[in-house]
Amino acid sequence: MIYKFKSKAAADLIFLPENARQVLSILGKADVAQGIIEPADMAAAVLALQAAVAQAEQAQAQSADEARARGEKPPPSPAVGLRQRVQPFIAMLERCERAQQPIVWGV
């Protein structure tokens, strides 16, 4: 199922299921087919996504450092990292928070 995040304050944002579940998991809304993010919760959502990005990038760098220390070639970085995947969602959250409009999906 494609996930479509909608709000009156921003254009629709479409995610493939795997990516949407990852984002929703970061936001503490895993396994939720439909839901809402209220404007009051958006600042915390942005911080959670930014923390997840930092953690993913740190894990990738640590993995590369460990491989180099063993004399191996570092594992390739993902073609599209978490930072690129969540950036449009963060922008949507920030826009909707300023406009005091919720974000919904699955409805």
Image (cartoon, rainbow, N blue to C red):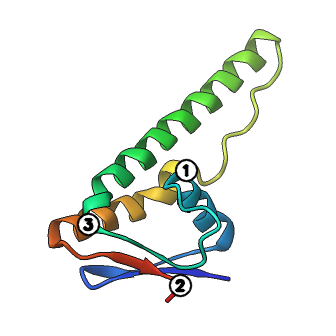
Name the quadrant containing residue 68: top right
- Please name whichever residue, 65 or 26, is drawn nearer the observer in this view of the structure: 26
Name the quadrant containing residue 31: bottom right
- Local crowd at mark 1 within 10 Å, few (<14), some, or many (≥20)? many
Q: Is residue 12 above or below residue 66?
A: below
Q: Is residue 58 above or below residue 53?
A: above
Identify the residue shown where x is 82% and y is 12%.
71
Sequence-earlier tag: 1 or 2: 1
Q: Position of residue 79 (x, y in %)?
A: 65, 52
Q: Is residue 55 above or below residue 12?
A: above
- Local crowd at mark 2 within 10 Å, few (<14), some, or many (≥20)? some
- Please name whichever residue, 107 or 68, is drawn nearer the observer in this view of the structure: 107
Name the quarter where the N terminus is drawn: bottom right
Q: Position of residue 82 (x, y in %)?
A: 55, 50
Residue of label 1: 82
Which label number is shown at residue 106? 2
How far apart are the two marked residues, 1 and 2, measured between alpha carbons?
A: 22 Å
Identify the residue shown where x is 75% and y is 10%.
69
- Amino acid type, residue under disc 1 in the picture: Leu
Which label number is shown at residue 39? 3
- Residues at marks 2 and 3 touching, judged by CB atoms closer than 8 Å: no
Count of numbered tags: 3
Kindly give the residue lying farthest to the bottom in the view shown. 107
Instruction: Tell me: 53 left or right of 31.
Output: left
